[in-house]
Image (cartoon, grey):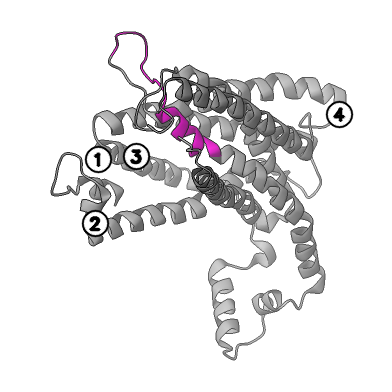
């Protein structure tokens, strides 16, 4: 749908704006975006939990080697995602800015089809945990429907589970929610900080001199600077898994070197450092704008190189190596076997809510500075 929407042309080929598009065209585009968000919400928690299930211990006991392999899996999962992130931010952003959005979206569609085919080919070899209480998804939906519309229904295992007639298991799940809620809430700050990469950082980059070298016509798209974030993670994740973890394992005796909460805490602390670095760079950017008399000219490129943005991208990358991977492993480990994907979904929801919080933070800051007469570029 995004590929089709990108082929829709406004009446004015040049300088086309969103206002020149018809309502059906805009509606089609937004439906495509929301479908993409829904697909991501279904896909990512399930595929990440499925991958971790392949390293589950063969018995109910905790096998240290299996736990270490599973912890390593989360590192290499983030490594593969970071590689894809580098390709998307560097390659696709350049193609979409200089060749066309249709080509970029079409390439993504082709890769998705190939991925689906490879996933289906490996289906017979996958190892999956059985659902909690061995209840199938269709049975759960049926029971909830009967509960909502109050239709008479024979009381079976599904109904008893949904109605809370199994106090031991139901109480255990409620206890897990209460235990995880503080970590979930506190992690929203971390998610809001890391979301600045796609909002405020990109806006900052758009005002800088993004030419590569002197006399070259190559201009780096603002979104392509996120490539440095991906590169940082691609470099550090193997170092963390193959060098740092074995060293810390000898010191702490923990199979992952650090506990998940220690890793999350280190990531949160590093994200705070990233905001300090970003604030210093922003102060420098505003100083350059004042000296050049361009404070009220956000459309004019400042005489400041894009390389000033590099440190904050690198520090955020370090924070994600620690915090993002730690959160994913923590929420996976803290739920029962049959609810692993729900645990990963809780982790994913942190970054979804954090993105909204980041957007509101940027809007509130922009409104406040405009009302006081100081314009944020």
**Contact, CB < 8 Å: mark 3 with mark 1?**
no
> How far apart are labels 3 and 2 at the CA level?
21 Å
Secondary structure under badge 3?
A: helix
**Contact, CB < 8 Å: mark 1 with mark 4?**
no
> Residue at position x 46%, y 20% from top?
291
Q: How busy is the neighbourhood of tag 3: few (under 14 within 10 Å), some, or many (20 plus)?
A: some
Query: Residue 356, how many percent across, how many down?
Result: 54, 51
The magenta span reads: 196-216
**Contact, CB < 8 Å: mark 1 with mark 2?**
no
Of the numbered discs in the image, which one, if any, rests on residue 25? 2
Q: Quadrant of residue 177?
A: bottom right
Which residue is denoted by mark 1 in the rendering?
A: 102
Of the numbered discs in the image, which one, if any, rests on residue 68? none
Q: Quadrant of residue 171?
A: bottom right
**Contact, CB < 8 Å: mark 4 with mark 3?**
no
Which residue is denoted by mark 3 in the rendering?
A: 108
> How far apart are labels 3 and 1 at the CA level?
10 Å
Residue 197, above or below 2:
above
Which residue is denoted by mark 4 in the rendering?
A: 253
Q: Earlier in the sequence, mark 2 or mark 4?
A: 2
> Residue at position x 16%, y 39% from top?
14
> Residue at position x 58%, y 72% from top?
140
């Amino acid at each position: 749908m995004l590929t089709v929407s990108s082929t829709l042309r406004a009446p004015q080929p040049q300088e086309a704006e969103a206002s020149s598009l018809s309502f059906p065209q805009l509606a089609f585009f937004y439906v495509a975006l929301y479908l993409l968000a829904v697909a991501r919400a279904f896909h990512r928690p399930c595929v990440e939990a499925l991958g971790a299930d392949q390293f589950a211990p063969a018995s109910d006991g905790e096998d240290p080697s299996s736990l270490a392999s599973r912890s390593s899996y989360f590192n290499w999962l983030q490594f593969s995602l970071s590689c894809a992130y580098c390709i998307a931010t560097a390659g696709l952003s350049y193609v979409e800015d200089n060749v066309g959005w249709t080509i970029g979206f079409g390439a993504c569609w082709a890769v998705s089809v190939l991925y689906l085919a490879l996933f289906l080919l490996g289906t017979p070899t996958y190892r999956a945990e059985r659902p909690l209480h061995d209840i199938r998804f269709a049975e759960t939906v049926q029971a909830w429907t009967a509960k909502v519309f109050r239709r008479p229904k024979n009381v079976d295992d599904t109904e008893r589970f949904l109605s809370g007639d199994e106090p031991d298991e139901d109480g255990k799940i409620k206890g897990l929610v209460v235990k995880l809620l503080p970590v979930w809430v506190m992690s929203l700050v971390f998610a809001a900080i890391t979301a600045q990469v796609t909002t405020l950082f990109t806006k900052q980059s758009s005002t800088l001199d993004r030419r590569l070298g002197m006399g070259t016509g190559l201009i780096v798209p603002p979104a392509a600077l996120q490539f440095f974030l991906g590169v940082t993670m691609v470099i550090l994740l193997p170092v963390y898994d193959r060098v740092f973890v074995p060293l810390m394992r000898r010191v702490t005796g923990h199979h992952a070197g650090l506990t998940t909460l220690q890793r999350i805490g280190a990531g949160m602390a590093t994200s705070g450092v990233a905001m300090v670095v970003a604030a210093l760079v922003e102060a420098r950017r505003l100083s350059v704008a004042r000296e050049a008399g361009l404070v009220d000219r956000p459309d004019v490129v400042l005489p400041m190189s894009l390389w000033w943005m590099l440190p904050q991208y690198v520090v955020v990358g370090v924070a994600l190596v620690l915090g993002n991977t730690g959160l994913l492993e923590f929420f996976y480990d803290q739920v029962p076997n049959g609810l692993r994907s729900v645990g990963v979904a809780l982790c994913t929801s942190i970054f979804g809510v954090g993105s909204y919080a980041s957007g509101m933070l940027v809007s509130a800051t922009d409104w406040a500075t405009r009302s006081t007469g100081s314009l944020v570029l």
